Amino acid sequence: MSSPEIRASVLDAIGETPLIRLRLASEATGCEILGKAEFMNPGQSVKDRAALYIVRDAERRGLLRPGGRIVEGTAGNTGIGLAMVAKALGYRATIVIPRTQSQEKKDAIRLMGAELVEVDAVPYSDPNNYVRYSGRLAAELDASEPAGAIWANQFDNIANRAAHAETTGPEIWRQTAGGVDGFICAVGTGGTLAGVAQALREKKPDVAIGLADPFGAALYEWYAHGELKAEGGSISEGIGQSRITANLEGLVVDYPFRISDREMLEAIFALAEHEGLVMGGSTGVNVAGAVALGHALGPGHTIVTILADYGSRYQSKLFDPAFLEARGLPAPPWLKR
């Protein structure tokens, strides 16, 4: 049976997500602020795209053998995406995650059938950082298992960036009929921002590219002042970077912004209360960044950002009044009912 409405597998449902007009952000800036609804991917996040491209790239290069294992260090969503792709293609997955990440994401990884390894949350400079630990584990499993193992290495594997240069960016260009004036999002690996920037700049060299960086990350200072320096901290998960990953190499950012937890929370609570979109923390950072970019560019521009994943993956944190109040952060009255 063949039909454009029938997908051959769950993998063919990745991508082609719609743009959603964000009414409050648009009204606040006089711009058209559009969110790319990446939470509508089958693994429910933007990371599905990178997961699929990383696995397909490993297959093309002969690194991933039938029955092999995929190992990755992740804050959660890439792990979910890789576990989904692995199941669909007959591979196994082992995901290494900082134990500080939300329980909902850990549960989703296990539900997808992946082995979950929790480690302490330590800086990248520490050999036991989840990314570096996963690399060593992949090497050990590759040597000991009959079908071998690969390390997905999402931070420095440029198949990640290629996923967005070849799919997300061209989709945005087509969906806006070439009318996009600016794109902005937060950085975890850098694949989304750098890949979309590459695709859009090939079509429109003067498109404005922005970075929305949480406190505790170092990229705002890098792109604003040329120094990798972090200040403060954030409760956001899966975003924030202290180094220039391979996916970020060569990226030029026109408008870097630093976004506080309060701004992030205000954005996600407003989306939930007034627009029916219950989103995660990175989406809050993205939308707050899009508003900042809208103010910088001025009224009349079309700006796109990423609606990265569902808020249900952070229900025990971002949507828990006790969690927020213990950290001096506001919880709206409707959340306390």
Image (cartoon, rainbow, N blue to C red):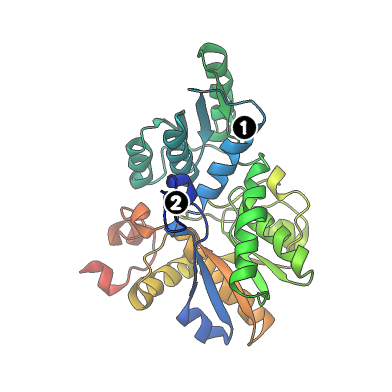
Q: Is residue 198 above or below residue 26?
A: above
Determine whether, in the image, residue 145 is placed left or right of residue 313: right
- Residue at the image position 77 percent from the left and 63 percent from the top: 202
| Residue 51 image position (x, y, % from top left) | 54, 42
The amino acid marked with disc number 1 is Ala
Mark 1 secondary-structure assignment: helix
The residue that disc 1 covers is 58
Determine whether, in the image, residue 233 is placed left or right of residue 248: left
| Residue 138 image position (x, y, % from top left) | 55, 24
- Residue at the image position 65 percent from the left and 74 percent from the top: 180
Q: Nearer the viewer, mark 2 or mark 1?
A: 2
**Which of the 4 image quarters holds residue 310?**
bottom left
Q: CA distance from mark 2 to mark 1?
A: 28 Å
Which corner quadrant holds the C terminus? Answer: bottom left
- Residue at the image position 58 percent from the left and 59 percent from the top: 186
The amino acid marked with disc number 2 is Ser
| Residue 98 image position (x, y, % from top left) | 46, 38
Q: Is residue 137 above or below residue 324?
A: above
Q: Is residue 126 above or below residue 296?
A: above
Residue 76 is at least partly visible in this image: no
- Residue at the image position 41 percent from the left and 44 percent from the top: 101
Counting residues from the start of the chain, the first of labels 2 and 1 encountered is: 2
Categorize mark 1 by other alpha carbons within 10 Å: few (<14), some (14-19), many (20+).
some
Q: Nearer the viewer, residue 206 or 290?
A: 206
Categorize mark 2 by other alpha carbons within 10 Å: few (<14), some (14-19), many (20+).
few
Q: Is residue 18 above or below residue 150?
A: below
The residue that disc 2 covers is 2
Q: Nearer the viewer, residue 302 or 223?
A: 302
Residue 3 is at least partly visible in this image: yes
